[in-house]
Structure formats: structure tokens, C-alpha cells
Amino acid sequence: MHGAEKLGEAGLALLREHENVDCSYQLSPKELYVKIPLCDALIVRSGTKVMREVFEAAQGRLGVVGQAGVGIDNVDLQAATELGCLIVNAPTANTVAAAKHGIAILAAMARNVAQADASMKAGKWQRNKYVGVSLVGKTLAVMGFGKIGSEVARRAKGLGMHVIAHDPYAPADRARAAGVELVSFDEAISTSDFISLHMPLTPNTSKILNDKTFAKMKKGVRIINVARGGVIDEDALVRALDNGTVAQAALDVFTEEPPPKDSKLVKHENVTVTPHLGASTVEAQEGVAIEIAEAVVGALKGELAATA
Ligand code: MLT
């Protein structure tokens, strides 16, 4: 068993009860290809891409890849299926942490916390420059009303926001019970003051926010993304920020991670950024470690069906 990215101690302990565990972090692809034929399972977080080359290098031994988080978009599912490897994930343990981070960067963006902090640290005192906007009575569109989206909705309502949601797969009664109206994609993006993204990255959601969809939004809309960078066309977002369609954006995830050092989006003064921290609380990571350890051990014992 090989752990490619840091996993919480409780999860490692659980794995060690059942398997030999090798933790080597930040391996180059070449180093991983050397190790992988010796492994029955591989555990990664979203920072490691498990592409066809990894499955091929495994020479048939790798039976399970565990993705320690909700998303499984960094695993080549096609190659895994073809080469007979199960993919399991940890779909629940970090949902509240991700939702809270969405709310944290939404609130920080609305009150210019990061910009004001940088300005004070540069010796300035700019009270007039950093006047924010209130959240009370503003409409928030939650795009993707799954586990994370619904936790965001609940918290946003607590902040006095009017919450609507778009999700083609969410049952209307679950939304109704949460006091959230499900609306069409176009209605959600064209009537909201804030738009928060919570959908998985799939061929259908790739660059779902683009020049065309930004053009339908209210002038001065604010965008929050703790889902996946690829759901936004980042060049189009820079254009929308520059022409004032989008007043501000708060982003935890990027098409390329880490983003290029000269990224216009990251450096934009109206953008608040964090380095993919949604799932990164001590508590969430311990929970994820246990959840993924149980899933991987179960899969190795043949007790689990594949996620993908
Ligand atoms: C997730 O998909 O749950 C997270 O992106 C996992 C991570 O932070 O690595």
C-alpha cells in the first residue's frame, strides 16, 4: 500500500492494522512509476494526478486507488476501468469543512479582508478604500445542491442571504425542506448577487462559467469557487472582472494547481485566493483519513463496490 499525499494519523493507524503502508510524499511521476508495481493500493489527495501511465506502470498489481476527498476528477477513470482497478473516495468527511471555507472566503471577499490585511501590513490605513458590501438580503445562487452546496445554503441563510439553487439532479423536496428554491441555470446566474459553485468537474460542467454565461449575469456579481478550478473559464473570468461584470471573486481552486506564478487571475486586485484549503482542517483531514482507510481496506478485502 502506498500513500502519495499526507494522510491523517488515525487513518494511517487503521491502514497499518491491515496492510504494510509506505508513505512517500511528493514523488516525481518517475519515482511513482518505480514504486507502483509493488503496491496493491494507492491513496492520493487532489494534488496527485493518477493518469493512465500510473495504471500501466502498475503491471496489473494495483487493485485500488483511494482518493482522500470528495472529487475523483484527478483519476483517469477510463484507464482504471480498463485495467481493472477500483476507485474509492471519502465522500462525506470534509463536506462541512469545504462548505465553511466557501462561506469564509465569501465573507472575506465581501469585506475585503485579505486586501485590507495586505494593505495594513504594507504600513497603510485605508478605511475608505476597503468599504465592503452587506450580505443581508442579497441573493446567493448555489450551483450544485449536493452535500457541500446544501451546507453552504444553510449557513448563507443564517447570514441573512436569500438562497436559490440550481442542480439538475437535486430532489425538489430536499431543497424545499432547506427553504431553498431550485431554479434553472439561467435564472440562477442572471438573478443573483453572489454565485457559489459546488458541482463536480465533468465534461458537462467544464468551463460552465464562460464569456457567454458571464454576459448573462447581473453587473457587479460576486463569484465563489471551492469546487474545481476547471468549472470556470479563467481567462473569461479575468475579462469579466476587468469589464466590471464581476465585481469580485473568491477562489480556492484553479484549473492548474498551483497556478502559474504570473496568473492574472490570482494577482487581480478584486480576487481573493486561497491554495485549495477547502478540506484542510485538522478535524476534516482526520475524518477523511479514516473514511478513505476504511474504504481502501474494504475494497482490498473485496467488500466494497467501486465508486466509479
Ligand atoms: C475534495 O475533493 O474533497 C478535496 O479537493 C480534496 C483535497 O483537498 O485534496
Image: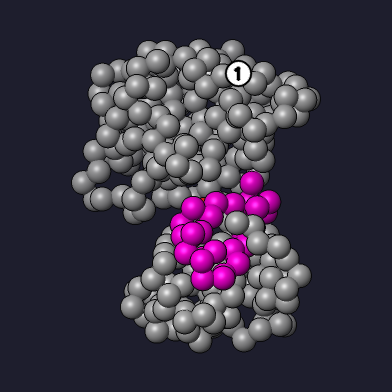
In which image quadrant can residue 111 be found? top left
Amino acid carrying mark 1 in the image: Val
Q: Quadrant of the C terminus?
A: bottom right
Q: Position of residue 200 (x, y in %)?
A: 53, 43
Which sits in the foreground, 150 or 213?
A: 213
Give the residue at x 62% y 86%: 20
Which sits in the foreground, 207 or 103?
A: 207
Q: Position of residue 23 (x, y in %)?
A: 52, 79
Q: Is residue 72 something that shows in the picture?
A: yes
Q: Position of residue 66 (x, y in %)?
A: 58, 66
Q: Is residue 116 something that shows in the picture?
A: no
Give the residue at x 49% y 59%: 78
Give the residue at x 33% y 78%: 30
Pointer 1 residue: 183
293 versus 147 height, above or below = below
Dot 1, how many residues are within 10 Å of its Cα: few (below 14), some (14-19), or many (20+)?
some
220 versus 101 height, above or below = above
* Left or right: 111, with 71 as reference point: left
Which sits in the foreground, 133 or 45?
A: 45
Magenta-drawn segment: 70-95
81 versus 150 height, above or below = below
Query: In the displayed image of the protein, which residue is found farthest to the front?
Result: 82
Give the residue at x 41% y 43%: 229
Q: Find out whether residue 44 is within the magenta segment.
A: no
171 versus 90 height, above or below = above
Name the colouring of the figure.
Answer: one colour
For the residue labelled by badge 1, is the local secondary structure a helix, a strand or a loop?
Answer: loop
In which image quadrant can residue 264 be found? top left
Q: Position of residue 279 (x, y in %)?
A: 56, 51
